[in-house]
């Protein structure tokens, strides 16, 4: 499947996961949700890897470690923000990752002495964020300041994790292996934090267990799609398409929480979709012609 379609699928699944995390936060701490999400992810990726005959042994433990540190920390902060803030606000702060990524790449290009920067693609990222602001227009009071900072930091760390995923893909790591080690990091970190801060695990109800399972299944499937997209696609193109997750979240808000559809929200959604389409067109225009020796993600 092409990287843009994988990214759209991932954003839809992550938006659905956000709803489940919000509901599960009534029963579990963020660290415990992260732990169960990691356990489900490990089981899923180990099973799929076994079915495909793929070894989970890696020659790049250091890269996986750094990817897990940034990714798991971002995930914990994001789940914490979702549990404490309105879902729309938490999603907005996390989706700042695309703007952080643009700044990281721009800064890196300047430091390396690049003669030409892709300003059109960067502009499409910023245009997408304008759409996000119009849809959600998050506001924070003083009591929510720390929660808001946690959500903002989750976005910055997510941008670092996405760039590390790209590096792992370029190094030849299969997406199943990348997601397995990320899930393992989440399970270990979540268990340690839960033991230290909560003193133990919560008892499960049928509804709570269902929510935890749904978070794990949705997140892992989305993560596999996202990892493949970032491994084979262009980071800033994926950043643009990632804004579609805000559209999906807004639709969930209307359907589940009866949020009103305003004029600014309509304009914002159009801007987000337009930014995603523009990024895809720019990528296709800049992409080199396919060769027989090139890897085709649609064939895997």
Image: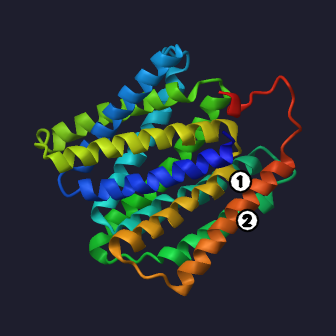
Give how far across and how far down residue 130 sits, in percent.
Answer: 61, 73
Q: How many marks are shown on the rendered structure?
A: 2
Tell me how far mark 2 sits from mark 1, CA to CA: 12 Å
The residue that mark 1 highlights is: 106
Scheme of colours in the image: rainbow
Give how far across and how far down residue 2 sits, in percent.
Answer: 69, 42
Q: Disc 2 or disc 1, which is closer to the eye? A: 2
Give how far across and how far down residue 63 sits, in percent.
Answer: 54, 27
At 50% from the left edge and 21% from the top edge, which residue is drawn?
61
Secondary structure found at label 2: helix
At 63% from the left edge and 41% from the top edge, which residue is drawn?
229
Look at the image and tell me in which quarter the N terminus lies. top right
Q: Viewer-proximal residue, 118 or 263? A: 263
Q: Viewed as shown, does residue 237 lie left or right of 120?
A: left
Give how far across and how far down residue 232 sits, in percent.
Answer: 68, 37
Look at the image and tell me in which quarter the C terminus lies. top right
Q: Viewed as shown, does residue 16 lie left or right of 235?
A: left
- Neighbourhood count class around disc 1 (C-alpha, 10 Å): few under 14, some 14–19, many 20 upward: some
- Neighbourhood count class around disc 2 (C-alpha, 10 Å): few under 14, some 14–19, many 20 upward: some
**One can see residue 70 in this view:** no
At 69% from the left edge and 65% from the top edge, which residue is drawn?
275
Secondary structure found at label 1: helix
Disc 2 and disc 1 in contact, CB within 8 angstroms:
no
The residue that mark 2 highlights is: 123
């Amino acid at each position: 499947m092409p990287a843009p379609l994988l990214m759209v699928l991932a954003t839809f699944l992550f938006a659905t996961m956000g709803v489940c995390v919000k509901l599960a936060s009534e029963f579990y701490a963020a660290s415990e949700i992260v732990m169960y999400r990691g356990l489900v992810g490990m089981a899923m990726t180990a099973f799929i890897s076994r079915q495909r005959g793929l070894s989970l042994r890696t020659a790049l433990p250091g890269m996986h470690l750094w990817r897990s540190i940034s990714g798991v920390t971002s995930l914990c902060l994001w789940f914490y923000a979702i549990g404490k803030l309105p879902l729309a606000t938490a999603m907005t702060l996390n989706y700042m990752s695309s703007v952080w990524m643009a700044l990281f790449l721009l800064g890196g290009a300047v430091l390396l002495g690049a003669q030409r920067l892709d300003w059109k693609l960067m502009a499409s990222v910023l245009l997408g964020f304008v759409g996000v602001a119009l849809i959600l227009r998050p506001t924070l009071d003083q009591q929510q300041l720390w929660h808001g900072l946690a959500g903002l930091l989750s976005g910055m760390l997510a941008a670092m994790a996405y760039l590390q995923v790209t590096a792992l893909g370029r190094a030849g790591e299969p997406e199943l292996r990348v997601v397995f080690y990320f899930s393992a990091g989440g399970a270990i970190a979540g268990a340690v934090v839960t033991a230290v801060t909560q003193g133990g695990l919560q008892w499960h109800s049928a509804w709570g267990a269902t929510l935890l399972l749904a978070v794990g299944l949705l997140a892992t499937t989305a993560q596999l799609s996202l990892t493949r997209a970032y491994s084979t696609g262009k980071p800033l193109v994926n950043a643009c398409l990632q804004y579609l997750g805000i559209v999906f979240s807004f639709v969930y808000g209307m359907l589940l929480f009866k949020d009103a559809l305003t004029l600014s929200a309509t304009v914002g959604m159009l801007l987000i979709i337009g930014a995603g389409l523009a990024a895809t067109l720019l990528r296709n225009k800049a992409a080199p012609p396919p060769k027989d020796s090139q890897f085709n993600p649609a064939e895997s």
